[in-house]
Amino acid sequence: MTDQSHRPDTSLSDCVLAALDIVVLEWEEGLREFRLQGVPPEWWSQCVGSTIRNSLDLSQCSPFLQDYLGGIHSVWQGSPGPIEKSGAWTEPDRQGGTMTLEARPLFLGPRKLVLIERLGSDFEHMRSIVQRARERMLAEDITAKSHRNTETRLIGQLEASERTKDDALALLQQLGLAAIVLDERGQITFATDRTLEMLGCAMQEILGRPWDQVLSFRKEDRLLIQHLLEGSSKIHSSGPLCFEGASSKWIELGIHRDLAHTGRRILIFNDRTEVHALRQALNEQASFHDLIGKSPAMLRVYQLVRDVAQVDTTVLIEGETGTGKELIARAIHSSSARKHKPFIAANCAGLTDSILTSQLFGHKRGAFTGAIQDQQGLFEAAEGGTLFLDEIGDIPPQVQTALLRVLQEKEITRLGEAKPRTVNVRVVAATHHNLSEDVLRGSFRADLLYRIRIARVQLPPLRDRREDIPLLAQSMLGQVCAATGKTVERLHPDTLRLLMSHSWPGNVRELKSAVEFAVISCKGNEICPMDLPPEIAGATVVPSPSVFIPLSGQDEKTRLLAALSEAKGNRTEAAKRLGISRATFYRRLGEFDLASDQ
Amino acid sequence: MIQKKICMLGGFAVGKTSLVRRFVTNVFSEHYQTTIGVTVEKKTVMVDQQDVMLMLWDLYGEDEFQHIRESYLRGSSGYILVMDGTRKATLDTARLLQQTVVRTVGPIPFVSIINKSDLQSEWEIDQPAIEQLREQGWPVFFGSAKLGQGVEELFGCLATMLLSPASPPRTCL
Ligand SMILES: Nc1nc2c(ncn2[C@@H]2O[C@H](COP(=O)(O)OP(=O)(O)OP(=O)(O)O)[C@@H](O)[C@H]2O)c(=O)[nH]1
Ligand SMILES: [Mg+2]
């Protein structure tokens, strides 16, 4: 029993080996071959094919095994050290898959063994960990690479857009364009150098600030801009607006939507100060108060008016009928220090002694029949202001005396009163007469003439300033259209030629009535020659101006008679032909004792 | 028949297994299954009128998880260094492996290939780096296991070098 129990049990060791799933090969030194020990696991035949008598035919082994077993002798012969494993290798398995094996040499006393095992679940577990780790590394590599690519692309794009921005900026600065960019809230996000120069401030002072705090526009302009900014169309242009910066400027404003960012606005300022100043100067020259004309003659008149307005003396305005003497008087008044006080105009022509006296100086109740109450005169009414006495050459001798007294004493006495009243009135007189001749003829007091002719403005007749005719005609056309509601826009060039060549004995007044006539006759929106009054429309030759001036003496009498006969005795028509008012025409007839004859 | 042991060396996932598969069985798979240990494949080629049996040792890729086991290298006649053109780091791995082989088995013949030339637009290994390798005496191939480009030439060249160890044939370079 005991003996038996110590005998090696070969079947047991075979079973153990089989259970361990291990192949055991032993090197038979004598036979110089490997022999299989025990029963090999069933996978073994895959590596070696069939084994005859347990001896291993190396040439039948898988390439790895051949290599390993072929080289193992050098391991056995080498110095004893850590026993080196073969490392894992893969063999095809029976199922068409693979199995992973590993071999190791083993010394048992003098016996040389090789153990071959099939790597199992632990190995598979390790393999799947490595697989996952490597897949993750590859994925991370791809992600990192795509990040790098994106970064490179973005940097490239950024650089490109920076370059574009720099170029655009350089261009903008080079152009000297004044522009600002506003964000959705109307705050400034950018301004060009030119703008900063215009505003007289530095970039950091305005960045992020609301535009209306930085750009000092007048209130109404600010509201207009606000309105435009809120609008939805692409471009708005407006102006010129007055910009009260370091120095006042007139600018034209363009508001553009930023196409790339809705809500953002680009404001472009065009400095129009110079143009504005020039235009204003031009306008000023083309008209003065209500006077129109920019001929040298009229420019001299404007200057004279300005000069005369500076002083407070009496002024005599001389000019043919219809030249606009009252407009000059009004211009003097409104350019003078008295401009906020009354301006009163009185026509002295054709009034009797007493009526004129009462009109000028006022009267006491009962001073004459019909004087039912106290009445102040025009002098008193014009207190502090200007009294314009038209046709001063026509005032009767008594009134001339009274007027002289007022001018000297600055006092008036109402008709029927004894006590004089002090007045402070500037007298501006006008006449179409040659008053010096009247003085010689004895119809006008010399001392009064000197008194009223301290300052003197001579208005040129229209024929002496023909270059003003287009301007005047156009302006009158506008006025007449506004008054009549007709829309006539312009004068045909032929019409203008006729107007330019007419001699205009009735001066601006005659021109005005010709335009009125033409507007009424006009069918379209352009005045044609045939729309003009017949005496202008029919004219072909420019008559000599000498025929019409001066309006005095025998010449004038001849003209009145000629006009009357041309008008077949119709006085209104005759007055129109002469370009003078009907009242003047009658007065003239009276002067020449023609009133009853005709 | 002459037998030659050739090791496929390189970083992980550079395409060692794919190149061997393409060469031996002319197949390719997009699916990546990392090699653990070694798989040995055989293929007979004709060099100078004689058949040569190439034993292709497809080793696992070198990385921080697995370092090359020097025992695998013993007995090698030559080796192939594989790089992945889309990953610059695989060039550095190839350099290290080359030094390891020289240390372990000496200056045996080798060729190198920059694989995945079908993805050339994504390559990170640039011309100057390649020039540098050539200056150091590396025969450098470009190829694609996926498209089968440069594969025959690669193995053919090494086989020729193994049989006439004087210098790499001109056609290789
Ligand atoms: N596009 C492309 N992919 C390739 C090419 N060669 C290999 N691949 C792919 O790259 C991955 C790795 O290929 P493997 O051949 O397994 O690489 P390996 O070098 O053997 O990898 P390890 O065994 O892990 O060291 C797989 O998904 C292949 O499909 C190629 O030429 N082009
Ligand atoms: Mg592999």
Image: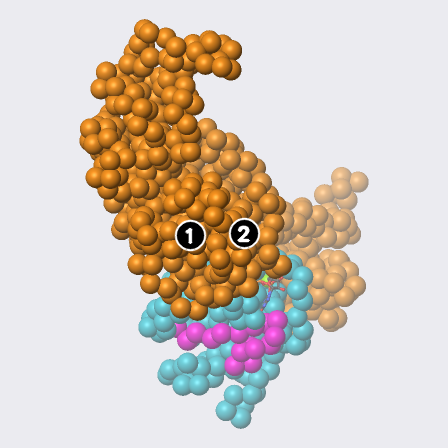
User: Ligand 1: does it lie within 8 Å of the C-beta at label 2?
Assistant: no
Task: Indicate the secondary structure of the residue bearing disc 2.
Answer: loop
Region of the chain picked out in magenta, as a range? B138-153
Indicate whether residue B152 is drawn in magenta.
yes
Q: Place residue B38 in its image quadrant.
A: bottom right
Indicate whether residue B162 is drawn in magenta.
no
Amino acid, disc 1: Leu
| Residue A210 visible in the snapshot | no
Q: Is residue A238 above or below residue A399?
A: below
Q: Nearer the viewer, residue A494 or A275?
A: A494
Mark linked to residue A560: 1
Q: Nearer the viewer, residue A94 or A32?
A: A94
Mark linked to residue B42: none
Badge 1, how many Cα within 10 Å: few under 14, some, many 20+?
many
Mark 2 lies on residue: A570
Q: Place residue A215 in its image quadrant.
A: top left
For this orientation, the residue located farthest to the front is A597
In the image, A328: left or right of A567? left
Task: Indicate the secondary structure of the residue bearing disc 1.
Answer: helix
Quarter of the image where the N terminus of chain A is located: top right
Report the chain shown in cyan.
B
Q: Quadrant of ligand 2?
A: bottom right
* Residue at 47% over, 84% down: B160
- Report the magenta stretch's main SS: loop
Report the chain shown in orange.
A
| Residue A535 visible in the snapshot | yes
Chain bearing mark 1: A
Q: Is residue A288 above or below residue A35?
A: above
* x then y, percent, for residue A166: 36, 52
